[in-house]
Amino acid sequence: MDQTIGSYLLLAFVVIVPIVWFFVRRRVMAKVRSAGAQSGVNLEHRITAGEVGKLSTRLRFTDGAAGRRIVDEVFSASKDITVTGPASWTLRHVNPDDVALSWTVDADGGAVLRVERAREMLGQLVGGRVWTKLVARIEAASTAGGFSAVRESVPLVATAELADGGRVWVAG
């Protein structure tokens, strides 16, 4: 009699546990997927927001001629910068034209250096770290030269345009 009870309990265990496990596992896995997806979205948002913030920085110079000399000096010392025109450059991350920079002269003799266009690569904006270093060098050289370069922020906006599979962002 004890053997039959044990056999029935073993049979019940072998049949009931997999059925219960099937339903519990589905519910647990659904919660895990949901939490993972949310974490991925949050991480992507933090990465993109950080790079957009870096590339949104522009410099305003009160003395445009002196500012241009400093910019030319700093850019000529950087292997990541390519001159593309009299007032435009590109910053290389992987491709030579990952980030497009421009120099605009104001009517009052001042000037602005800013990011005109940036490209995503593998879902992330590129060039933010290099741009931040260049901005810091330009600010230091401006201060040493006796005039100011003021940081401003102009947000970059994602466009529908694609370049090499990534979105293109432009100054807003």
Image (cartoon, rainbow, N blue to C red):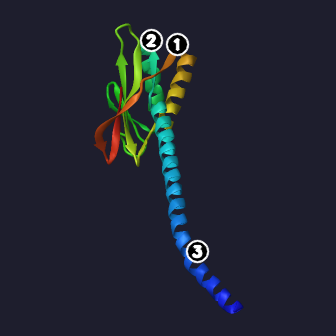
> What residue is at 33 percent from the left and 38 percent from the top?
168
98 and 79: which one is in front? 98
Q: Give the mark nearest the N terminus, 2 or 3.
A: 3
As drawn, which residue projects farthest toward the right?
2
Give the residue at mark 1: 147
User: Secondary structure beneath disc 1?
Assistant: loop
> Along the horizontal axis of the image, is 149 left or right of 7?
left
Give the quadrant of the N terminus: bottom right
Vertical placement of residue 8 versus 38, above or below: below
Amino acid beneath label 1:
Phe
> Along the horizontal axis of the image, is 53 left or right of 1?
left
For the residues labelled 1 and 2, say whether their Cβ atoms are less than 8 Å apart.
yes
Instruction: Give the distance between the C-alpha atoms of the residues marked 2 and 3, in whole angstroms.
Output: 78 Å
Q: Residue 17 carries which label?
A: 3
> What residue is at 45 percent from the left and 11 percent from the top?
62
Instruction: Give the distance between the C-alpha atoms of the residues marked 3 and 1, in whole angstroms.
Output: 77 Å
Vertical placement of residue 170 versus 153, above or below: below
User: Secondary structure beneath disc 3?
Assistant: helix
Amino acid beneath label 2:
Asp
Residue 160, given in percent of the width and then of the height, sits at 29, 38
Instruction: Give the distance between the C-alpha atoms of the residues marked 1 and 2, in whole angstroms.
Output: 7 Å
Vertical placement of residue 105 versus 16, above or below: above
Q: Give the mark nearest the N terminus, 1 or 2.
A: 2
Amino acid beneath label 3:
Val
Give the residue at mark 2: 63
> What residue is at 40 percent from the left and 19 percent from the top?
112
68 and 115: which one is in front? 115
